[in-house]
């Protein structure tokens, strides 16, 4: 194989890895900045407050209040997991960009 062909293949690989790295960084930032979980959390918290006020008057609402508290806790864990995945995607994207830089200038 000629040296030009190898250099072209290396450049194409470096550019494709760089593109995938940028795409990963964008996906990670998108995941971190997504506000859909926060709106859900606000809605659940508002309903939980209504249930809490109602549970003081009615005894039968207490199990529903407990389920609501567990739902809020689960949603909080979901938000933490989404933030972790977003941060992981950003770090992987950065590593891919650095690897492509290394491949291009090797």
Image: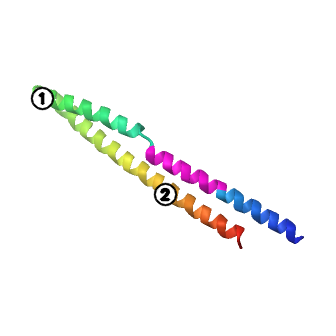
Q: Quadrant of residue 53?
A: top left
Q: Which residue lies most toward the bottom here?
A: 106
Q: Is residue 31 magenta?
A: yes
How was the colour assigned to the protein in this rendering? rainbow
Q: Which residue lies most toward the front here?
A: 105
Q: Quadrant of residue 43?
A: top left
Between marks 1 and 2 in the image, the one whose residue lies nearer the viewer: 2
Q: Quadrant of residue 104?
A: bottom right
Instruction: Please give the name of the residue rendered at 20% of the width and 32% of the height, measured from the top-left corner.
Output: 49
Residue 58: percent from left, percent from top: 12, 26
First of labels 1, 2 by sequence position: 1
Using the image, determine if residue 71 lies above or below residue 2: above
Residue named by callout 1: 59
Q: Main secondary structure of the magenta part?
A: helix
Q: Which mark is residue 88?
A: 2
Residue 100: percent from left, percent from top: 66, 64
Categorize mark 2 by other alpha carbons within 10 Å: few (<14), some (14-19), many (20+).
some
Q: Which residue lies most toward the left here?
A: 57
Report the side of 55 relative to 1 (left or right): left
Using the image, determine if residue 86 lies above or below residue 100: above
Q: The magenta stretch spans which residues?
A: 19-33
Residue 23: percent from left, percent from top: 60, 51
Categorize mark 1 by other alpha carbons within 10 Å: few (<14), some (14-19), many (20+).
few
Q: Judging from the image, what secondary structure is the residue with disc 1 in? A: helix
Report the side of 98 relative to 38 (left or right): right
Residue 63: percent from left, percent from top: 20, 34
Instruction: Please give the name of the residue rendered at 12% of the width and 29% of the height, measured from the top-left corner.
Output: 59
């Amino acid at each position: 194989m000629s040296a030009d062909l190898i250099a072209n293949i290396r450049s194409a690989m470096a550019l494709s890895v760089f593109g995938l790295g940028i795409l990963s960084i964008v996906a990670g930032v998108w995941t971190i900045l997504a506000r859909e979980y926060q709106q859900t959390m606000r809605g659940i918290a508002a309903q939980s407050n209504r249930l809490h006020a109602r549970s003081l008057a009615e005894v039968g609402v207490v199990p529903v209040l407990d389920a609501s508290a567990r739902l809020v806790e689960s949603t909080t864990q979901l938000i933490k997991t989404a933030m972790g995945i977003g941060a992981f995607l950003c770090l992987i994207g950065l590593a891919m960009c650095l690897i492509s830089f290394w491949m291009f200038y090797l």
